[in-house]
Image: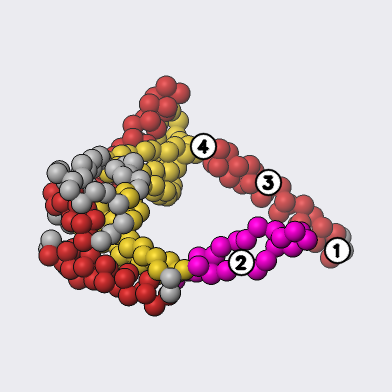
């Protein structure tokens, strides 16, 4: 028997040996189960971020800017007096925009060029309030000091990590509980865990105030604030090897 015939027989023998192994691997891949566990933890927020704005208009940009600077300085001073630290104050937006008057079309159907009739200056200050009991009074105070635009309130947690870890434990326990139920119902048993992956999503409470505009200076009571609850949700995907019951 020549060398080429020996080589061909060797290749056929090798293929016959590897085919059962591939089949076994396919069956092993089928003996797996993946489930998702979800864990949620709720907590009352302990901080809020508000955006306090000052908008001023005047015939010239300089006059509008001067008026805005004066009002914003007063607003910042009031915020600082309530105990908000400098690290929790940040300018979040500043703009100077012209105001235009658009004349009507003349008798020939042409529209004259628009004319600048004044300027608007806006300045926004992002404030992190950690003493939430003072938030309502702070909003009243900044309006009295000259703020005429407050663009919402976002509540949060200063240290969410412990709650995130608690949600992870709950999600893992949820996945394991479901896995045990399924294998018992199917007459199987759980083998070792093959993989664990995490997908997290944080659900914030609805904003207490979507938008606060200028209020009368003689407001008798502070702005009512509803904190709601802060929810942290964790999603965990776990894959197990599934074994026959013995």
Q: Nearer the viewer, residue 231 or 70?
A: 70
Who is closer to the viewer here, 132 or 204? 132
Disc assigned to residue 4: 1
* Residue occupying the point 86% across, 63% down: 4
Judging by the rendered image, the residue that carries numbered circle 2 is: 114
Residue appearing at x 29%, y 43% in the figure: 208
Q: Disc 2 or 4, which lies upstream in sequence?
A: 4
Q: Which residue is mark 3?
A: 19
Number of the front mark, 2 or 4: 2
The residue at the point 60 percent across, 42 percent down is 26
4 and 3 marks in contact (CB < 8 Å): no
N-terminal label among 2 and 1: 1
Task: Please indicate, yes or no, whether residue 153 appears anywhere in the rendered image.
Answer: no
> Dot 1: what SS?
helix
Q: Please identify the quadrant where the N terminus is shown.
A: bottom right
Q: CA distance from mark 2 to mark 1?
A: 93 Å
First in sequence: mark 1 or mark 3?
1
* Left or right of 178 in this view: 8: right
State the residue at coordinates (43%, 66%): 120
Decide whether residue 106 is among the magenta residues: yes
Picture coordinates of residue 137, whole percent (x, y): 15, 51
Counting from the top left corner in percent of width and height, residue 124 is at 34, 64
Cα gap from disc 3 to disc 2, whole angstroms? 82 Å
Tag 1 near tag 4, CB within 8 Å: no
Boundaries of the magenta span: 95-117
Mark linked to residue 31? 4
Instruction: Find residue 100 and report its horizontal and vertical position in percent.
Output: 54, 65
Crowd tier of the residue under label 4, counting other residues whose Cα lies within 10 Å: few below 14, some 14–19, many 20 or above: some
**In this rendering, would 156 be left or right of 37?**
left
Residue 55 visible in the shown view: yes
Of 133 and 165, nearer the camera is 133
């Amino acid at each position: 028997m020549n060398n080429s015939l020996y080589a061909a027989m060797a290749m056929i023998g090798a293929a016959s040996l590897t085919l059962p192994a591939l089949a076994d691997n396919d069956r092993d891949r089928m003996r797996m189960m993946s489930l998702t566990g979800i864990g949620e933890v709720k907590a009352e927020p302990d901080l809020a971020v508000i955006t306090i704005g000052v908008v001023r208009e005047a015939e010239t940009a300089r006059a509008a800017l001067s008026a805005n600077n004066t009002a914003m300085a007063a607003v910042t001073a009031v915020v600082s007096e309530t105990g908000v630290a400098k690290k929790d104050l940040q300018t979040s937006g500043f703009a100077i925009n012209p105001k235009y008057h658009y004349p009507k079309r003349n008798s020939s159907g042409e529209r004259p060029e628009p004319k600048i009739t004044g300027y608007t200056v806006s300045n926004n200050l992002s404030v992190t309030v950690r003493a939430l009991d003072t938030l309502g009074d702070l909003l009243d105070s900044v309006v009295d000091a000259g703020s005429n635009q407050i663009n919402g309130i976002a509540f949060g947690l200063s240290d969410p990590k412990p709650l995130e870890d608690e949600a992870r434990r709950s999600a893992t326990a949820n996945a394991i509980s479901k896995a045990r139920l399924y294998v018992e119902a199917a007459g199987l048993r759980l083998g070792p865990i093959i993989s664990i992956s995490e997908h997290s999503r944080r659900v914030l409470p609805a904003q207490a105030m979507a938008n606060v505009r200028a209020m009368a200076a003689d407001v008798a009571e502070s702005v009512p604030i509803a904190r709601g609850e802060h929810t942290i949700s964790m999603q965990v995907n776990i894959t197990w090897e599934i074994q026959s019951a013995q």
